[in-house]
Image (cartoon, helix red, strand yellow):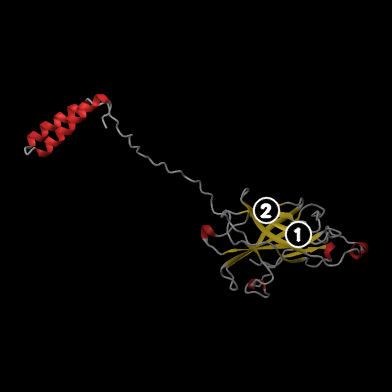
Amino acid sequence: MNAIRNTFTRAAQVITFSALAVASVDAAAAVKFRVGFDAASNQYAVYMTPDSVPSPDMLLSAQVTLVVPHAADAKRFSVENISSNIPGINWVDHSRVDAPKENQAADYISLGYYFSGSKVSAFGWVAGQEKQILTFSSKQGCVAGVKLIDSKDAFNQLPNSTGTNPGNDFLNVGWKMTNAYIGNYGDAVTCSAPSVTATTTTTTVTTTPAACVPTSKDADNMKRISALKVLKAEATSVTRQKEIDALIGRYQNKLSCKA
């Protein structure tokens, strides 16, 4: 698929500039991009931070290119349910190049801007303030390493091996109608390890009963038991030993503590 930058200007239908409007355009300004992942919503989001407010705030074209770890089959990164945070502004996954010669460890997915309706919506910029521009989901959930292409990316050195133009851009009338994108901020997406619920292992502890303390009534029986044990040790006949054991048992049963 040809990834030539998608402008969707509709210039003849919508955009009419007066000489005054063009003359009022300020000096070239700058806007930076960031991508992040929100675990609560299981969505990715693209943010932008401008250094000034464009006047007029009228977007002509824009492209945001994701760089994701290369994978195939079920692990191939997908972009789904793209949602714009700016009314009337839409984004579409319009280009993809998997594992190009310049970087076979990555896939490049370009999201292009287009607008619907009769008027281009303003973004409502505030200088120096980050704004969430769009969100999307992926069947693969959070994938560590997802980031945005930058000017140093080997695949972004034109002409590239596929003859495409994957670079990020943001062309706004109020920013001299030149590419106001100057780079990215923030880090590549990181994914927290799944939380592990601690499992308490129940250990069965066998409590040894307290030592048996004989009462005064047990004294005589315990003397008999001790004497019988001596006799048993001296007995040479197995039969005699069994007889003594039986007697020992009888006296033990009479003890108040059977331990």
The type of residue carrying mark 1 is Thr
Within 10 Å of the Cα at label 2, are there few (<14), some (14-19), or many (20+) other Cα atoms? many
Residue that sits furthest to the bottom in the current view: 159
- How far apart marks 1 and 2 lie (CA) works out to 16 Å
Q: Amino acid at mark 2?
A: Thr
Left or right? Give the position of 178 relative to 70. Answer: right
Find residue 135 and name its label.
Answer: 2
Task: Answer whether residue 9 is visible to the viewer in this image.
Answer: no
155 relative to 85 in the view: left or right:
left
Q: Secondary structure at mark 2?
A: strand
Q: Is residue 149 visible?
A: yes
Q: Which is in the foreground here, disc 1 or disc 2? A: 1
Residue at 62% x, 56% y is: 79
Q: Position of residue 27 (x, y in %)?
A: 86, 67
The answer to whether the residue labelled 1 contacts the one labelled 2, judged by CB atoms less than 8 Å apart, is: no
Mark 1 or 2 closer to N-term? 1
Q: Which mark is residue 217?
A: none
- Residue labelled with disc 1: 49
Q: Is residue 204 above or below residue 132?
A: above
**Percent x, y for residue 6?**
72, 63
